[in-house]
Image: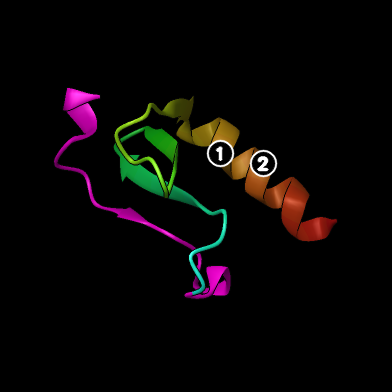
């Protein structure tokens, strides 16, 4: 997690402001990290940027 401590994370603009269940994403060269917005120090899922791009491509077509 310490490698990601200085990386800015962001939520989707579609998440709203009601404090609901959201995920945040952070980007580093070649990598994307996903975390729970309610527990930002609770752990990360780190993916290669190519896998993230594939996921986004698939979900935006669905």
Q: CA distance from mark 2 to mark 1?
A: 5 Å
The secondary element bearing badge 2 is classed as helix
Residue 11 vs 23, above or below: the answer is below
x%, y% of residue 28?
29, 38
Residue 21 vs 18, above or below: the answer is above
- The magenta stretch is 1-17
x%, y% of residue 60?
74, 59
Quadrant housing the C terminus = bottom right
- Give the number of the disc on residue 28: none
**Decide: marks 2, 1 in contact (CB < 8 A)?**
yes
Would residue 38 be found to the left or right of residue 13 on screen? left
The secondary element bearing badge 1 is classed as helix
x%, y% of residue 24?
44, 50
Would residue 44 be found to the left or right of residue 51 on screen? left
Quadrant housing the N terminus = top left
Colour approach in the figure: rainbow
Residue in the image at 54% along x and 34% along y: 50
Judging by the rendered image, the residue that carries numbered circle 1 is: 52
Assess whether residue 58 is covered by the magenta stretch. no
Residue in the image at 50% along x and 73% along y: 13
Judging by the rendered image, the residue that carries numbered circle 2 is: 55
In the foreground, 5 or 30: 5
């Amino acid at each position: 997690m310490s490698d990601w401590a200085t990386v800015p994370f962001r939520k989707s603009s579609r998440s709203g402001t009601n404090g609901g269940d959201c995920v945040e994403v952070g980007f580093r060269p070649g990598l994307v990290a996903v975390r729970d917005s309610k527990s930002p120090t609770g752990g990360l899922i780190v993916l290669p940027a190519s896998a993230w791009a594939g996921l986004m491509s698939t979900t935006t077509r669905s």
